[in-house]
Image: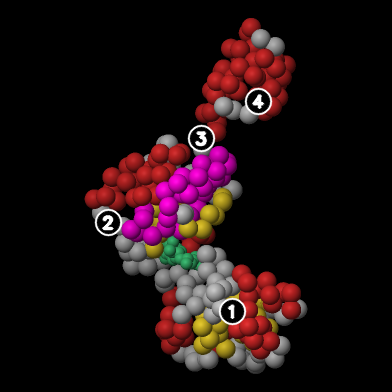
Amino acid sequence: MTNTHTTEPLPAGLYIVATPIGNLGDITLRATNVLARCDGIACEDTRVTGKLMKHLGLSKPLWRYDDHAGERDRARLIESMQTRAVALVSDAGTPLVSDPGYRLVNDCREAGVPITTLPGACAVIAGLTVSGLPNDRFLFGGFLPVKEKARADILAEFGRINSTLVFYETGPRLTKSLRTISNVLGVREIAVARELTKLHEECRRGTADSLIAYYEAHQPKGEIVLLIGPPETDEEDHDLDTLLREALLADKPSQAAGKVAKATGADRKALYARALELRAE
Ligand code: SAM
């Protein structure tokens, strides 16, 4: 555990440090302390991290690092962690979350380098909390694919899952993604969380179609978290129950399940189990 108050040098190893996603006030005490005490910082863009360090009144060696770095460069960085405390930061938010660091952390683990994580701002969580969409279960899908077919395939696959879906998005691609959502998933409750923690922060809710209409009239700028509410399973279950009940008037549970499965595309086994329950009622 890192002590927030001490100024002693840090034990050697890797420190994964989350930084703000907009508002610099969101840097944590512990992150500031580690950035002040580390021997150097591996970062995506030295100019971006340089600005943060300036804001904090700190100066440390900055080493450019991303997951495209060669094996040798990574090995050298890991070797240096035998004797030095190296902080890993990304341009904004939590490293590794749609950002570099996965390979480095994995290789550090294999090399037995001590790893410490310093949690903090993360756009997925900020978007989820402000959206008001169900958050008991959520699935983060990173950035939606740029190509229409790949995007539709991912949405069809994830769309069946009973959880809120969270994606990273950019302004220029937002309406295209909303259109694919409308085509593939139909009517769902959507949230567009934009410029979180910044001056022009907004979170707009609606169906894909209503949001397309809005954002065609108001060009979306800045950074976006796109959230899709879960399917309305209660209503569907209710409809399936009605169909099963009707079928059970004339058929055995297995036949009733078969007929409803054919008509709706719902899972036959689950329908059979439900048909048995309904008959027992
Ligand atoms: N590692 C970062 C994190 O923890 O959130 C995410 C890095 S990813 C390369 C950048 C994307 O995160 C942006 O394109 C946007 O979708 C989302 N993002 C980052 N900051 C944001 C903000 N302030 N408001 C909304 N979305 C943001």
Position of the C terminus, as image quadrant, is top right
> Residue 277 in the image: x percent, y percent?
70, 21
Q: Earlier in the sequence, mark 1 or mark 4?
A: 1
Badge 3 density bin: few <14, some 14–19, many ≥20, Cα 10 Å: few
Asked if residue 99 is among those painted magenta in the image, a careful observer would answer no
> Residue 102 in the image: x percent, y percent?
61, 69
Residue receiving disc 2: 219
Asked if residue 164 is among those painted magenta in the image, a careful observer would answer yes
The residue located at (66%, 9%) in the rendering is 251
Describe the element under mark 2 as helix, strand or loop: loop
Describe the element under mark 1 as helix, strand or loop: loop
**Label 1, label 4: how far apart the Cα atoms are:** 50 Å
In front: label 1 or label 3: 1
In front: label 1 or label 2: 1
Labels 1 and 4 touching (C-beta < 8 A): no
**Label 1, label 2: how far apart the Cα atoms are:** 39 Å
In this rendered view, identify the residue nearer to me: 106 or 189: 106
The amino acid pointed to by label 4 is: Arg
Q: Is residue 50 left or right of residue 260?
A: left
**Label 3, label 2: how far apart the Cα atoms are:** 30 Å
Residue receiving disc 3: 232
Report whether residue 70 is seen. Answer: yes
**Label 3, label 4: how far apart the Cα atoms are:** 20 Å
The stretch in magenta equals 146-174
Report whether residue 190 is seen. Answer: no
Residue receiving disc 4: 268
Q: Earlier in the sequence, mark 3 or mark 2?
A: 2
In front: label 1 or label 4: 1
